[in-house]
Each structure stands twice: as structure tokens, then as C-alpha cells.
Image (cartoon, grey):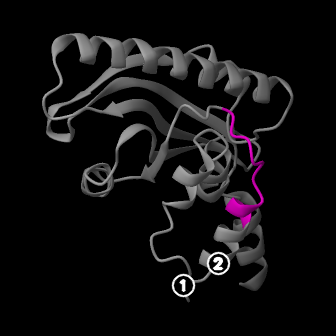
């Protein structure tokens, strides 16, 4: 699920910004080289080429470390906890929190007008990203996000002075049936008993 989301959002920033996330280039870590190959297979033209960089992770330290090295705009996808709720049919409904941010890394001497312009530009980019999500959900291209949740999305300001960044965040609850396949795993383990 996390890898699927990573690859989905990798369609948005410029191709160079996506590839830069693989700092090591190659690795013996299972799946790393396959992931690099999957990124190389993405379309040459990104959905929002105005977004120069891609940051994907869970921790503020990862974000800060990556943003310290960036110049310009970035897409940051922060995936959070997963809640599981039995659906009464021996299966689960999974709800995952997701924060999708489009922001600019601001120069050290940026003034209030530059921050306002960055805020305006990133809000428009985030609105386009949200529209793409809606179109993909309507077309059945994303199974980890129910269409109804996109209508309940919330957009909040992303102002991080410690990151010298300004932009906007789309807050989502990704609800899908048993995306972790817990029901099937439970049945297979029960057969072993």
C-alpha cells in the first residue's frame, strides 16, 4: 500500500525531482532496485512539472534533511497511522491518514510578498493535484482511496519557518477495504493451526 502510494504521487513532480529521492542509486535492500526501475518507467511528462522535488516519508527529521538540500517547489507526502475496523463480514476497513503538501523552499531573505506569491502558486498546484486525485478515483485508478473521502478533504496552510517553506497541505483519510489483506492472512494462519 505504501509503495503503491509512493509510485502514485511520483507521477506529479518533475522526473529529475523524483529520481533524486533515491540517494544511493542502487542498493541490496530488497525491492530498492525494483522501485528505481518502476520510477524510470513513469511517463516522461509529469502531471505537475512545476513541482521540482519529491519528498516521501513519515518523520520530520527525514523531511528536514531532504528539504535542507532542495531548491524551489516540492511535493511532500506524509503517510500516517492506519486504523482498522471490522466490517462484520470477517474483514476489515482500513483508514490511513495522508497529508499531501505542495510548498516552496523559500530563500533566506524572502519578504512577505514572496511568501504570499509562493502561497498563491502552491494553492493552485495543490488544487490541480486534488483534481487529478478526483479524476483517478472516478476512473477507478486508485484502490487505496475511496472517492467519497476526496469530497471530505481539508486544505490547510503549510508554514514551516524551521524549513524555510510555505505552501498548502491536503489532508485525506484514505479508506479502503482491507488494504493490508488481514482477513486473508488470518484465514491462512488459521489453517495452519
Q: Is residue 122 left or right of residue 117?
A: right
Q: Residue at x 48, y 60 (%)?
A: 21
Residue at coordinates 72% horizontally, 49% vertically from top-left?
A: 91
The region drawn magenta spans: 38-47
Can you say whether 19 is above or below 104 in the image?
Answer: below
Residue 185 to residue 143: above or below:
below
Q: Position of residue 100 (x, y in %)?
A: 48, 34
Task: Look at the numbered disc 1 and give the secondary structure of its residue.
Answer: loop
Can you give x and y, in whole percent of width and height, for residue 186 in the image? 70, 67
Out of 183 and 94, give the one closest to the viewer: 94
Q: Residues within 10 Å of mark 1 (few under 14, many from 20)?
A: few
Q: Mark 2 falls on what kind of element?
A: helix
Along the horizontal axis of the image, is 2 left or right of 168?
Answer: right
| Viewer-side residue, 135 vs 48 | 48
Tell me the residue that label 1 is attached to. 27
- In three-dimensional space, the C-alpha distance between marks 2 and 1, rounded to whole angstroms, equals 6 Å
In the picture of the structure, the residue carrying the numbered disc 2 is 33
In the rendered view, tell whether residue 85 sits above or below residue 137.
below
Q: Residues within 10 Å of mark 2 (few under 14, many from 20)?
A: some
Percent coordinates x, y for residue 9 in the rendering:
61, 43
Asked whether residue 106 is drawn in magenta, I would say: no
Rendered residue at 24%/56% (across/down): 61
Q: From this view, report whether residue 95 is shown above or below residue 25.
A: above
Instruction: Indicate the quadrant where residue 135 lies.
Output: top right
Amino acid at each position: 500500500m505504501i509503495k503503491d502510494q509512493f509510485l502514485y504521487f511520483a507521477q506529479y513532480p518533475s522526473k529529475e525531482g523524483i529520481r533524486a529521492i533515491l540517494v544511493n542509486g542502487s542498493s541490496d535492500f530488497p525491492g530498492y532496485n525494483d522501485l528505481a526501475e518502476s520510477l524510470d518507467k513513469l511517463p516522461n511528462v509529469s502531471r505537475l512539472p512545476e513541482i521540482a522535488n519529491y519528498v516521501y516519508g513519515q518523520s520530520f527529521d527525514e523531511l528536514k534533511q531532504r528539504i535542507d538540500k532542495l531548491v524551489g517547489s516540492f511535493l511532500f507526502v506524509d503517510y500516517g497511522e492506519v486504523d482498522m475496523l471490522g466490517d462484520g463480514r470477517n474483514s476489515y476497513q482500513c483508514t490511513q491518514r495522508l497529508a499531501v503538501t505542495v510548498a516552496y523552499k523559500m530563500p533566506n531573505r524572502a519578504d512577505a510578498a514572496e511568501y504570499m506569491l509562493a502561497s498563491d502558486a502552491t494553492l493552485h498546484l495543490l488544487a490541480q493535484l486534488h483534481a487529478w486525485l478526483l479524476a483517478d478515483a472516478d476512473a477507478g485508478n486508485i484502490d487505496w482511496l475511496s472517492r467519497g473521502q476526496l469530497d471530505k478533504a481539508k486544505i490547510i496552510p503549510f508554514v514551516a519557518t524551521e524549513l524555510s517553506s510555505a505552501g498548502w497541505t491536503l489532508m485525506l483519510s484514505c479508506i479502503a477495504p482491507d488494504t493490508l489483506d488481514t482477513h486473508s492472512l488470518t484465514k491462512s494462519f488459521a489453517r495452519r493451526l
